[in-house]
């Protein structure tokens, strides 16, 4: 415990010996840091809030007869793509009309600046907030307005484009299947005209056999109707055999069945496309009358009057504590670099020799007065830093804000000339 107290006393004495160095360093850091904080350009934040209404009264009525969209998915896509490169390029051209697209370095810097200073937040399920921070308040407002236009108009334009592409594709498919149906109908008609005799003979024979089967279920083979049908069938079979029509009739019926089946498939696909075309038309009319996503601008972007940053109060307090810490750190570093011995015991331990004696300083009354004066001066110097910090906080606050724009412009011009 005694050793710890001795070490603390030694450290305190070493720092006290270098008190003016510590105070001068703290003041230098305080003046430098506070000047930088005061000259920092004001940052203005412009923002807009948009309410996206996904509840349409027409949606329940159109269910099953129109193409249904997923509003939640549309919102997620809009949020993730708003800060995409094409949109950033459009905003850069809108707010910087004279930007040179050929200067890729400057263009990339502008795009990076817009992206890093723009925030798209979701406040609740249907409320979006778009904010941008710039040193120029009007520029911040123009940037937010450009993003707002893209957010609202881009979605509606994309919906119209997608619907037009879908309708164009369906129209082409309808035209193709309509042509196929006409060709198939013509082939069926031509085939029927060429094979009418064969088909009719084969059809009659099939009808008689079917009727004979029904009669045999009801009557016996000696029944007059059954006997008559058998005679007719034998007569037709004899005729077909003579004309070699049996095989021709079967082949013709098979070909006709294939044609009819092809026609049925084409007709089914054609009808399905007609239904889709009607569904697309109803969906387009519904979007025109009542859009699936309706945008309400709750808070339009305005030119900000008061800056949103930087937070000079926090920065000045940080500069104050950093300056005091820097002064103490320098005094401590110098004391560590000092190779003198602060106590007789440390001298004896360093050389491993017995200590014969020591000389003590007997303070005079004047030394006590000087020590108190130095302590008072150190306190006043440290307190002045606190007063300066408080004064700067007051002057840069909203109540006593002083326009330092000319001073900042002068400092920027001097730094630019020096560079």
Image (tube, helix red, strand yellow):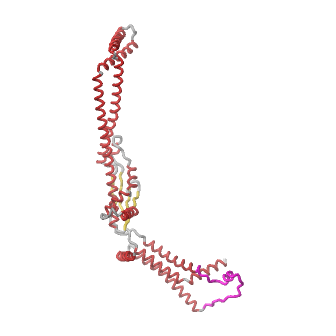
- Residue 64 visible at all: yes
* Front-lying residue, 9 or 107: 107
Q: How many marks?
A: 0
- Rendered position, 221 above or below 167: above
The span shown in magenta is: 335-363
Q: Main secondary structure of the magenta part?
A: loop
Query: Looking at the picture, how far across and down is residue 191, in whole percent?
Result: 30, 25
82 to the left or right of 15? left
Q: In which quarter of the image is residue 207?
A: top left
Q: Quick one: quadrant of the N terminus?
A: bottom right
Q: Based on the picture, tell me whether residue 216 belongs to the magenta stretch.
A: no
Query: Looking at the picture, how far across and down is residue 173, in whole percent?
Result: 32, 39
267 to the left or right of 8? left
- Rendered position, 218 above or below 156: above
Q: Based on the picture, tell me whether residue 356 belongs to the magenta stretch.
A: yes
- Residue 401 visible at all: no
Query: Looking at the picture, how far across and down is residue 232, in whole percent?
Result: 33, 11
- Rendered position, 87 above or below 286: below
């Amino acid at each position: 415990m005694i050793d710890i107290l001795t070490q603390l006393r030694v450290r305190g004495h070493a720092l006290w010996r270098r008190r003016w160095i510590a105070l001068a360093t703290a003041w230098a850091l305080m003046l430098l840091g506070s000047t930088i904080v005061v000259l920092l350009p004001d940052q203005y934040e412009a923002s807009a809030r948009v309410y996206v209404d996904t509840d349409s009264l027409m949606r329940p009525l159109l269910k099953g007869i129109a193409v249904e969209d997923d509003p939640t998915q549309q919102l997620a896509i809009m949020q993730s793509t708003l800060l995409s490169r094409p949109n950033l390029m459009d905003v850069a051209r809108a707010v910087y009309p004279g930007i040179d697209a050929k200067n890729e370095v400057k263009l990339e810097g502008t795009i990076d600046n817009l992206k890093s200073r723009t925030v798209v937040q979701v406040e609740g399920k249907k409320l979006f907030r778009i904010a941008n921070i710039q040193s120029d308040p009007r520029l911040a407002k123009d940037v937010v307005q450009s993003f707002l236009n893209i957010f609202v108009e881009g979605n509606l334009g994309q919906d119209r484009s997608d619907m037009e592409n879908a309708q164009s594709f369906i129209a082409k498919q309808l035209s193709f299947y309509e042509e196929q149906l006409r060709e198939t109908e013509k082939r069926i008609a031509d085939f029927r005209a060429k094979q009418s005799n064969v088909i009719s003979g084969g059809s009659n024979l099939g009808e008689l056999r079917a009727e004979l089967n029904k009669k045999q279920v009801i009557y016996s083979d000696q029944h007059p109707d059954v006997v008559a049908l058998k005679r007719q069938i034998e007569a037709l079979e004899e005729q077909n055999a003579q004309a070699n029509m049996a095989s021709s009739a079967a082949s013709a019926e098979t070909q006709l069945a294939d044609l009819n089946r092809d026609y049925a498939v084409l007709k089914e696909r054609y009808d399905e496309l007609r239904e889709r075309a009607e569904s697309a038309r109803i969906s387009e009319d519904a979007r025109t009358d009542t859009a699936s996503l309706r945008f309400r601008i709750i808070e339009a972007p305005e030119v900000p009057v008061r800056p949103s940053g930087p937070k000079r109060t926090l920065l000045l307090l940080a500069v104050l504590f950093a300056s005091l810490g820097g002064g103490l750190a320098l005094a401590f570093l110098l004391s560590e670099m000092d190779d003198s011995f602060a106590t007789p015991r440390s001298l004896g331990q360093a050389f491993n020799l017995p200590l014969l004696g020591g000389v003590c300083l007997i303070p005079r009354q004047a030394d006590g007065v000087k020590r108190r004066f130095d302590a008072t001066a150190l306190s006043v110097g440290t307190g002045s830093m606190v007063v300066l910090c408080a004064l700067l906080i007051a002057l840069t606050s909203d109540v006593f804000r002083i326009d330092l724009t000319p001073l900042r412009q002068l400092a920027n011009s001097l730094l630019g000339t020096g560079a």
